[in-house]
Amino acid sequence: MPYVITLSRDLSVSETPGSKTGFIGVAAIRPSTKYPQHPFFQMGRFQNPPIDSSTDLRVAVRIMLDFIFPLSNAIVPDPGLSIEIDWPKARERANEALRSVDELAGYISREDERNLYKQALEIVQETIEFVLEQTSTGENYSLLWQGFD
């Protein structure tokens, strides 16, 4: 099932959109510093792997996101749903996933897709670190379910 999830920030805080932090409106999206050419993940934007990707990759990415950010509270969230995240806990879960990335990626049959999965996980971790660098608890940051792509 296609999806796009973006990092968003409550604009009631002091900084304005378009400031040096790189925010455009409420979205906090930027290329990954590690993998700027990743085909379906950016810092702050996680989307479904392309339809021509294997089912293995698409399922693995969704499971990874559900593990790090328990999105399954809403099985099919409504578009525009803002999902509050426990960012320190998300960091713990991302670190746990990174420790077992080779085992998890082993379920993906194509080697190129295993690499994309590992990179996607690192981009998720990079996003979490970005949020926690802004504020130690990640307050004012949430994930915005943008519905179907």
Image (cartoon, grey):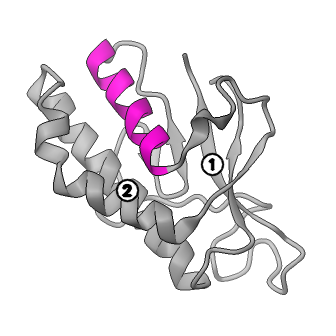
**Mark 2 = which residue?**
123
Q: Quadrant of the C terminus?
A: top right
At horizontal 19% and vertical 37% (from top left) the residue drawn is: 104
Residue at the spot of label 1: 6
In the image: residue 83, left or right of residue 71 = right
Distance of mark 2 from mark 1, alpha carbons?
13 Å
Count of picture labels: 2
Q: Which residues are magenta?
A: 54-68
N-term mark: 2 or 1: 1
Question: Picture quarter containing residue 75?
Answer: top right
Q: Amino acid at mark 2?
A: Ile
Q: Secondary structure at mark 1?
A: strand
Horizontal and vertical percent for residue 70?
55, 44
Label 2 SS:
helix
The quadrant of the rendering that contains the N terminus is top right
Residue 56, horizontal then vertical, whole percent = 27, 18
User: On the picture, is 129 further left or further right than 147?
Assistant: left
Asked if the stretch drawn in magenta spans residue 57, the answer is: yes
Measuring from the top left, give residue 145's x and y in whole percent: 69, 39
Label 2 CA crowd tier, 10 Å (few <14, some 14–19, many 20+): many
